[in-house]
């Protein structure tokens, strides 16, 4: 009992009496002010907007240390290129380029262009709050009814999903899942009453139902055969180089991919035609700091863009020259858990688009360009012909050699 | 085998980099953009991230 008596005060401590606590008076007022302004919660902002068109020349802020400008002017001018505000034509279309800066946004970020005027097309103005922050986005995300296609609604989709994807045998688990679906508050019996299940299942089986990225999958694809020359050493019965042909090289011509991209009305507003430098200057008395962010704000893009502007253009062509930044990815993809079905894909992204949009699969910005054929497909062929000419082999050896081909 | 891998990869890339692409690379392609302006586009390679398929 003595133990009990000693534990009593402890339990009292754990459950203290309720006390009426009030916030200190400075926190009670409606106009709450933080003692440290750095702790303010500031919503993300896009880079600062461009000035309205036509104002480019007035807003230009010539920089005395403009390397691009001096290099483009120094070709046919004397050493006085430190005065970049002059606008004499230099024979090149790029000779009139100036350093143009936008105003700073609340984070001290601003954009610096090297161009004649600010671009007429500003992808940053298309950036909304949902692109900058995923907090707001996740709340409002609600799939449209068409996203359950070919099922007419969510209830029908969940039933169909249960039927096809949750095992072929009845089990306690699948029964509970079924109860979970039809017991859900969102489940509407009226939704599934008129569903034409036979038609939907037939659509699924035919694979004729294309949606989203699967749509137009065949458009623009070409299949060509590739031939390579394989040398055979002199101890084979048929020495010398021999042609081997791989017939199924699926690919899309790069030019048509680019043309398709540029004509795409969904992506065009977000496509950057001109690079710029993104800089950060928290206050007027500090030097601006270059921000590493996108490909179209990188020195590599800027250098390539300037080289493009400086090169002699096409005759009788005054169109603005724009760089299309191609970024390739390629890797082998295992198609099945068992067996060696494999594809070697080549993907392409456009560096003119924001990496945040490229990273979203829902934006469909990844282009499939080619399916590389692997030598493994012709390995067997080569090996067989090799063996026929030289000597007879036991059947087991062939599988051994295809294993070697894999490695 | 390495020779075949390399030959095949290069043969396939030479199909991808066809004459149309080389002309576009040198002289650009003129496209009317969705904002109604005509521009001349020059494709350039920036990254190629890949496993070494030739091996």
Image (tube, coloured by chain):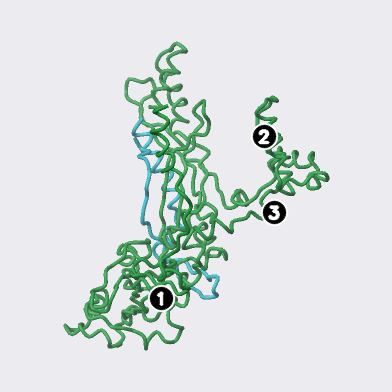
Q: Earlier in the sequence, mark 3 or mark 1?
A: 3
Q: Nearer the viewer, residue A126 or A40?
A: A40
**Mark 2 and mark 3 in contact (Cβ < 8 Å)?**
no
| Label 2 environment density (alpha carbons within 10 Å; few <14, some 14–19, many ≥20) | some
Please tell me whether mark 3 or mark 2 is closer to you in this view: 2
Q: According to the image, label 1 marks what residue?
A: A315
Does A276 appear above or below A325? Answer: below
* Farthest right residue in view: A194
Q: Marks 1 and 3: in contact by CB < 8 Å? A: no
* Mark with earlier residue (2, 1): 2
Q: Which residue is mark 3?
A: A145
Residue A243: quarter of image: top left
Mark 2 and 1 residues: CB-CB less than 8 Å, in contact?
no
- Distance from disc 3 to disc 2, alpha carbons, whole Å, reads 22 Å
Find residue A345 and report its horizontal and vertical position in percent.
47, 43
Residue at figure coordinates x 39%, y 35% from the top left: A229
Chain letter of the residue carrying label 1: A
For disc 2, the marked residue is A177
At numbered mark 2, what does the secondary structure look like: helix, strand or loop? helix
- Going from N to C along the chain, the mark reached first, 3 or 2, is 3
Colour assignment, chain B:
cyan
Q: Position of residue A58 (x, y in %)?
A: 37, 88
The residue lying toward the viewer, choosing from A68 and A358, is A358
């Amino acid at each position: 009992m003595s133990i009990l008596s000693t534990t009593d005060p402890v339990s009292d401590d754990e459950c203290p009496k309720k006390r009426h606590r009030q916030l200190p008076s400075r926190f009670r007022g409606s106009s709450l002010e933080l003692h440290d302004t750095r702790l303010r919660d500031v919503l993300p902002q896009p880079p600062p907007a461009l000035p309205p068109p036509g104002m480019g020349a007035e807003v230009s802020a010539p920089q005395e240390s403009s390397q691009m400008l001096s290099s483009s002017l120094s070709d046919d001018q004397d050493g006085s290129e430190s005065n970049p505000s002059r606008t004499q034509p230099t024979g090149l279309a790029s000779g009139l380029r100036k350093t143009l800066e936008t105003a700073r946004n609340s984070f001290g970020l601003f954009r610096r262009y090297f161009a004649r005027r600010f671009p007429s097309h500003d992808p940053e103005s298309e950036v909304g709050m949902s692109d900058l922050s995923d907090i707001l986005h996740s709340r409002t995300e609600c799939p449209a009814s068409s996203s359950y296609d070919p099922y007419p609604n969510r209830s029908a989709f969940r039933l169909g999903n249960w039927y096809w994807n949750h095992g072929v045998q009845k089990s306690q688990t699948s029964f509970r899942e079924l109860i979970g679906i039809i017991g859900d508050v969102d489940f509407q019996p009226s939704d599934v009453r008129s569903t034409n299940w036979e038609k939907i299942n037939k659509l699924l089986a035919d694979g004729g139902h294309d949606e989203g990225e699967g749509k137009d999958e065949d458009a623009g694809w070409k299949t060509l055969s590739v031939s390579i020359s394989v040398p055979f050493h002199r101890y084979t019965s048929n020495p010398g180089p021999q042609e081997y042909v791989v017939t199924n090289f699926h690919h899309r011509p790069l030019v048509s991919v680019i043309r398709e991209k540029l004509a795409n009305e969904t992506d065009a507003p977000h496509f950057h035609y001109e690079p710029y430098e993104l800089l950060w200057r928290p206050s007027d008395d500090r030097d601006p700091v270059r921000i590493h962010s996108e490909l179209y704000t990188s020195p590599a893009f800027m250098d390539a863009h300037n080289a493009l502007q400086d090169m002699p253009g096409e005759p009788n062509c005054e169109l603005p020259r724009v760089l299309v930044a191609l970024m390739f990815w390629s890797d082998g993809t295992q198609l099945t858990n068992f067996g060696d079905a494999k594809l070697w894909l080549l993907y392409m992204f456009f560096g003119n688009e924001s990496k945040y949009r490229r990273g979203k699969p829902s934006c469909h910005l990844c282009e499939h360009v080619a399916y590389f054929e692997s030598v493994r497909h012709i390995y067997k062929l080569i090996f067989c012909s090799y063996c026929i000419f030289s000597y007879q082999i036991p059947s087991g050896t062939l599988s051994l050699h295809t294993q070697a081909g894999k490695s | 085998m390495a020779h075949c891998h390399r030959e095949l990869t290069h043969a396939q890339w030479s199909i991808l980099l066809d004459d149309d692409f080389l002309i576009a690379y040198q002289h650009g392609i003129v496209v009317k953009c969705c904002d109604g302006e005509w521009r001349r586009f020059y494709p350039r390679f920036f990254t190629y991230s890949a496993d070494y398929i030739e091996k």
